[in-house]
Image (tube, rainbow, N blue to C red):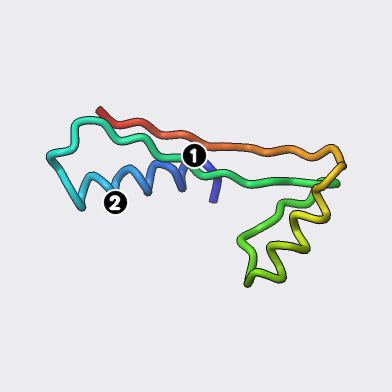
Amino acid sequence: MNLRTVAERKVAAARRADPAVEVIIAADTVASIDGNRLGKPADAEDANRMLSSLAGRQHEVLTGLAVSC
């Protein structure tokens, strides 16, 4: 699933939770290094491993954005 789709689903969920909200902004972000996307870390140790792999190295951070008003 692409980042924009995830962000759009977050907006839809927020709209269902509270239809009275006038503006909703949602995003989904992923980091990529050496052509490999990093997923959600399984635990704190996995998160530290991921952050260590990014530290001091060139990498990409991609964000999908959705806005509803």
Give the residue at x 57% y 37%: 63
Helix, strand, or loop for circle 1? helix
Give the residue at x 86% y 42%: 56
Helix, strand, or loop for circle 2? helix
- Residue 4 bears which disc, if any? 1
Q: Is residue 40 above or below residue 31?
A: below
Marks 2/1: CA–CA distance: 14 Å
- The quarter of the picture where residue 3 lies is top right
Density class for disc 1 (Cα within 10 Å; few <14, some 14-19, many ≥20) is some
Q: Residue furthest left?
A: 20
Seen in the image, is 68 located left or right of residue 49?
A: left
Density class for disc 2 (Cα within 10 Å; few <14, some 14-19, many ≥20) is few
- The quarter of the picture where residue 58 lies is top right
Give the residue at x 41% y 34%: 66
**Whole-percent x, y for residue 69 in the image:** 25, 27
Task: Decide which of 59, 35 is in the foreground and name it.
Answer: 59
Amino acid beneath label 1: Arg
Residue occupied by mark 2: 13
Task: Decide which of 26, 5 is in the foreground and name it.
Answer: 26
Q: Is residue 11 above or below residue 49?
A: above
- Residue 66 bears which disc, if any? none
**Whole-percent x, y for residue 57 in the image:** 87, 42
Mark before the other along the chain sequence, 2 or 1: 1
